[in-house]
Amino acid sequence: LFSAVEMAPRDPILGLNEAFNADTRTTKVNLGVGVYYNEEGRIPLLRAVAEAEKARIAAHAPRGYLPIEGIAAYDQAVQNLLFGADSALITDSRVVTAQALGGTGALKIGADFLKRLLPDSVVAISDPSWENHRALFESAGFPVHNYRYYDATTNGVNRAGLLEDLKALPPRSIVVLHACCHNPTGVDLELDDWKAILEVLREREHVPFLDIAYQGFGDGIDQDASAVRLFAQSGLQFFVSSSFSKSFSLYGERVGALSIVTASKEEAGRVLSQIKRVIRTNYSNPPTHGATVVASVLNSPELRAMWEAELAEMRDRIRAMRLAMVEQLASQGAARDFSFVARQRGMFSYSGLSAEQVERLKNEFGIYAVGTGRICVAALNTRNLAAVTSAIAQVL
Ligand code: PLP
Ligand code: TYF
């Protein structure tokens, strides 16, 4: 039965973890996978999460099946966080939200629904993008194109190329956009860019699919949602996949959501019925733990304040690491100006290191980065920074 099964390629990022774990050097540093590590080099368990879990365990709550679209209080909290609690879309019941298995699960449900809705459309993702974007939409049956995004000569956005490519797509294409903290580059769009993109999408009748996996890691919870809120005011219909993996440090609990903005409450009801059908034939209904914890934190004023402070702490620590990295690279005499690292947002930096330099970092120094030169700045701390910057200066 399996004699002709070929070996599938490893995920370029998760595959790095395996190599890292097998490395016996005590000085090794993992800048590959997009995970936030604290100053001690550990994945934090947030205090707000621990408090909510304590209360949940004490309550000895039964574990019945959840509704197909998940916990109502969770779905509501997701909408408030994305669109703002006072959003007219929410009061008009125009948004459909379903709890999902992480941001990945949200993308997959959205992709499967879109394939039924627009079977002949193409999908466009940024060049470069998170590796899984292409794979997810291809596995849903779509051809996936790239639109120009990153400009290596300026370490910024190729604005003209981006708009040109969106205009050149066939009408009613599905356009996946990183709402903040672009993965892998760390290079974000300005509000004026978003406005220009919105007009092209409207003109071409493209379907926006905003992916927001790092809300709160850039400039703040509301600031990072500014693109989502701009689209909310535009009158367009669009998709949003969101994730609490990073912002609640709940990676393994798989807590995310798919939200769809529709034109009316009546439309929302029909769309929800189709989303439920997609979910039912995939995993029936979502798990209880992570979403219960997130909902209790977001809906308790005390725990919410605690979470916001912890999220700010993570955000500020990443920023401090960006600045320290720029300074140390300069003082180590690195043969390149790295000041752009301080301007990037979120966990990642497209460092500009070549595949050969990344390979040398791994072999000679036990420092793991993605072959594209992406490094996870959120894995730096004051103990490993000097070793990392010195190694980078040496391979340059
Ligand atoms: N979208 C982007 C842009 C990401 O970087 C990630 C990273 O994990 C995800 C979606 C998936 O999030 P999750 O781990 O919640 O599935
Ligand atoms: O880009 C990253 O590192 C994170 C984690 O298939 C991740 O988004 C990477 C690859 C993958 C799933 C999650």
Image (tube, rainbow, N blue to C red):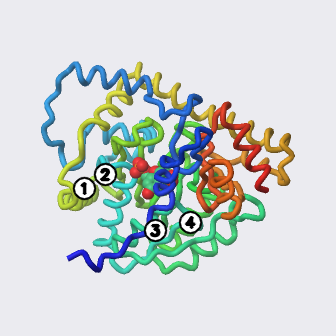
- Element assignment for label 2: strand
Residue 380 picture location, percent across and down? 63, 39
- Quadrant containing the C terminus is bottom right
Q: CA distance from mark 1 to mark 3?
A: 25 Å
**Can the viewer see residue 84 in this picture?**
yes
- Element assignment for label 3: helix
Q: CA distance from mark 2 to mark 1?
A: 6 Å
Q: CA distance from mark 2 to mark 3?
A: 25 Å
Residue behind mark 4: 126
Q: CA distance from mark 3 to mark 4?
A: 10 Å
Residue 37 picture location, percent across and down? 54, 36
Q: Residue at x 32, y 31 (%)?
A: 293
Residue behind mark 1: 272
**Crowding near pointer 3: few (<14 within 10 Å), some, many (20+)?**
many
Q: Which three-letter amino acid code belongs to the residue tagged 3?
A: Arg
Q: Quadrant of residue 46?
A: top left
Label annotation for residue 96: 2
Left or right: 179 in relation to 291: right
Q: CA distance from mark 4 to mark 1?
A: 28 Å
**Position of 145 relative to 15 (above/below):** below
Residue 58 vs residue 27, the one in the foreground:
27
